[in-house]
């Protein structure tokens, strides 16, 4: 028996995991809206409607468990009559569909990452090919993700992404430019380029790496003021991209390059195709070619066979490199990956202690770098208002994961640029005094 009234024929999309999943949910929502369906994203319980689509993450243990918990939550709601249908899609469903069907049979249907037409059919909608590049964005109006390719051809030992997303497939430049123009027409001012590996872009379509050519095309789109690069692989990095960043003011002086480790034995076992020497060379080149660039990276600790010596090497490297932005994860032993054949021999408590050490080091580095910004002026993008304060970002910060600038002002328009002077700094945030509203980027 129903315990509450729900709105019929309304579809609520729940998104787990990374920005690539957010993008996929936005594409699904765009298709549903074009079919005349009422669709919402992560609505409050009283507004969520009677059909639920859960876009899952299957990357590491914690993400998988969160996805499973969410599926179970909505299956429970279905049993109580609070929703009518529950569909599951995304990476977890792609990777573990048979197991999920056996363990949680009350889900109406499971779909993989490449089964959008089939999912739409189950939702009584048609897949409209003419809508390629069109979507309903779930991010704030002034910034959006632009996924330039799907899948990955890299052989990293610890990563299950190729199992869930397949091989690398680039989207043609003309389609991405058209999508960027569509987003700009809707008020988007910042594009955040995402892929499993941006540096591989174009190899399949154009037989060579064409990220630099894509960037030169995107900077010509009117209305787009900032373009930010996420997820560049260090091996085979197209160095001409650094020239484009230096020369084109629309390109943020920011690169997200997940390096994972620096000890040569660990890098070799991880099948990263690089060494400490090669990694340090590309990092030096980034800072030489683009003075003042902010480099974000992520690291994995507790990988099979990681010794105390390997970890000490990693710690010293973090101290020496002084990354502007850094995150650290504990190794997750994933089925069907190359590393799963190795013994997961670093105890979980040791993994967690090592991750905490790395982040404590980074906290000190971040605090010191932030203090060096006090007294300097920066152009910032205003993201939102929280109480009496406006929350903004410099070009050196990506939304949700990086530092923020707090500004006290009577009124600032969300999505606009402003000029501020930094007056105070904490470990991960800044305080700014408003100098000019509607700051010019020229």
Image (cartoon, helix red, strand yellow):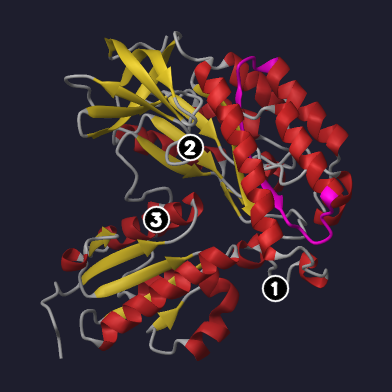
Residue 361 visible: yes
Quarter of the rendering occupied by the N terminus: bottom left
Which residue: 27% across, 74% down?
A: 51
Mark 2–mark 1 Cα distance, whole angstroms, equals 31 Å
Which residue: 51% across, 22% down?
A: 370
Residue on which disc 2 sits = 192
Residue on which disc 3 sits = 27
Mark 3–mark 1 Cα distance, whole angstroms, equals 29 Å
| Residue 291 within the segment the image draws in magenta | yes
Give the number of marks: 3
SS for tag 1?
Answer: loop
Residue 122 visible: no
> Residue 50, which numbered label?
none
Give the quarter of the image for residue 294.
Answer: top right
Going from N to C along the chain, the mark reached first, 2 or 3, is 3
Going from N to C along the chain, the mark reached first, 2 or 1, is 2
Q: Which region is colored magenta?
A: 289-308
Cβ atoms under marks 2 and 3 closer than 8 Å: no
Cβ atoms under marks 2 and 1 closer than 8 Å: no
Mark 2–mark 3 Cα distance, whole angstroms, equals 16 Å
Residue on which disc 1 sits = 335
Quarter of the rendering occupied by the C terminus: top left
Cβ atoms under marks 3 and 1 closer than 8 Å: no
Of circles 2 and 3, which is in front? 2
Question: Which residue is more in the foreground, 59 or 373?
Answer: 373
Question: Which residue is more in the foreground, 320 or 29?
Answer: 320
Q: Is residue 162 above or below residue 257?
A: below
* Left or right of 19 on screen, residue 53: left
SS for tag 2?
Answer: strand
Q: Is residue 1 above or below residue 119?
A: below
Of circles 3 and 1, which is in front? 1
Give the quarter of the image for residue 88.
Answer: bottom left
């Amino acid at each position: 028996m129903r315990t509450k009234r729900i709105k019929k024929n309304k579809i609520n999309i729940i998104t787990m995991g990374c920005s690539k999943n957010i993008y996929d949910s936005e594409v699904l929502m765009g298709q549903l809206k074009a079919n005349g369906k009422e669709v919402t994203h992560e609505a409050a319980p009283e507004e969520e409607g009677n059909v639920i689509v859960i876009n899952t993450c299957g990357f590491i243990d914690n993400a998988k468990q969160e996805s499973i918990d969410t599926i179970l939550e909505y299956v429970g709601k279905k049993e109580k009559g609070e929703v009518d249908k529950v569909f599951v899609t995304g990476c977890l469903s792609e990777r573990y569909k048979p197991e999920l069907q056996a363990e949680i049979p009350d889900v109406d249907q499971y779909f993989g990452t490449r089964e959008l037409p089939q999912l739409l059919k189950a939702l009584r909608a048609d897949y409209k090919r003419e809508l390629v590049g069109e979507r309903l964005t779930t991010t704030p109006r002034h910034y959006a993700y632009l996924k330039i390719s799907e899948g990955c051809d890299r052989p990293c030992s610890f990563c299950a992404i190729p199992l869930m997303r397949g091989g690398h497939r680039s989207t043609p430049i003309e389609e991405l430019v058209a999508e960027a123009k569509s987003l700009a027409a809707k008020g988007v001012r910042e594009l955040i380029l995402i892929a499993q590996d941006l540096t591989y872009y174009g190899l399949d379509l154009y037989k060579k790496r064409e990220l630099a050519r894509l960037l030169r095309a995107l900077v010509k789109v009117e209305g787009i003021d900032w373009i930010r690069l996420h997820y560049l692989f260090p091996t085979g990095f197209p160095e001409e991209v650094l020239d484009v960043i230096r020369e084109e003011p629309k390109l943020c002086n920011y690169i997200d390059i997940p390096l994972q480790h620096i000890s040569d034995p660990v890098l070799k076992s991880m099948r990263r195709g690089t060494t400490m020497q090669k990694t340090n060379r590309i990092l030096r080149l980034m800072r030489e070619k683009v003075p003042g660039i902010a480099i974000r990276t992520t690291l994995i600790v507790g990988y099979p066979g990681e010794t105390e010596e390997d970890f000490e090497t990693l710690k010293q490297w973090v101290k020496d490199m002084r990354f502007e932005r850094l995150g650290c994860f504990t190794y997750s032993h994933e089925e069907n990956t190359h590393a799963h054949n190795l013994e997961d021999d670093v105890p979980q408590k040791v993994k967690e202690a090592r991750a905490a050490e790395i982040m404590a080091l980074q906290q000190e580095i971040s605090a010191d770098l932030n203090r060096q910004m006090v007294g300097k002026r920066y152009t910032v993008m205003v993201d939102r208002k929280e109480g009496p304060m406006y929350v903004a970002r410099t070009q050196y910060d990506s939304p949700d994961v990086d530092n923020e600038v707090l500004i006290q002002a009577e009124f600032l328009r969300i999505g606009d640029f402003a000029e501020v002077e930094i007056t105070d700094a904490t470990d991960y945030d800044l305080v700014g005094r408003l100098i000019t509203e509607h700051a010019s980027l020229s």
